[in-house]
Image (tube, rainbow, N blue to C red):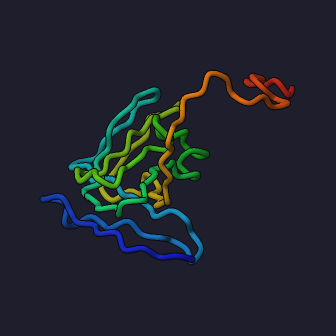
Amino acid sequence: MEEIKVEVSHIAGSEDMPLPKYMTEHASGMDLSAAVKEDTVLKSGEIKLVPTGIQISIPPGYEGQVRPRSGLALKHGISIVNSPGTIDADYRGEVGVILVNLGKKDFLIRRGDRIAQLIINKVSRADLVYVDKLPETSRNAGGFGHTGL
């Protein structure tokens, strides 16, 4: 398993927040915690940007992906609107998580609650080449359920 160095620091006033952490030996995602100043209710159907209190320096050639936590999704209907959210290597602002409550009940977010996962991945950049016609395949334009249920 390849390891890379990713620098992380706290936003002023969030020094008490835990840094992202792998919770098991083979976890691919690090848990991100909510740095809300006070208990915050995410009402059913509501979308909110939740701060994490951290900023990171992802090396060039890598990206961060912010994904939902499966337990919150299953038990409470909590997800991420732009899942996965992308953190580019040149971004240095606070990491925020755009949570949505798809459940039927309001959801309470407390300071320090684990709200999402952060995955660091390699990226490739495409060199787009314009052509007049694309090569054909057996699928061609079939999509959106074209193979049936």
Instruction: Specify the quadrant of the image occupied by residue 111.
Output: bottom left
| Residue in the foreground of this view, choosing between 13 and 130 | 130
Image coords of residue 50 (percent x, y): 32, 44
Name the residue located 26 percent from the left edge and 49 percent from the top edge.
Answer: 36
- For this rendering, which residue is in front, 50 or 135? 135
Tell me residue 54's x, y (percent): 26, 59
In the rendered view, does 7 fall on the left or right side of 118? left
Left or right? Give the position of 44 relative to 70.
left
Which quadrant: the N terminus?
Answer: bottom right
x, y percentage for residue 11? 18, 58
Looking at the picture, how far across and down is residue 128, in whole percent? Answer: 51, 37
> From the viewer's perspective, is residue 87 above or below residue 41?
below
In the rendered view, would you say 82 is above or below 23? above
Report the residue at 39% width, 58% height from top. 32
Query: What residue is rendered at 29% in x and 61% in y?
Result: 56
Query: What is the count of numbered marks?
Result: 0
From the viewer's perspective, is 64 left or right of 95? right
Q: Is residue 103 above or below residue 61?
A: above
Q: Residue furthest front?
A: 132
Quadrant of the frame with the C terminus: top right
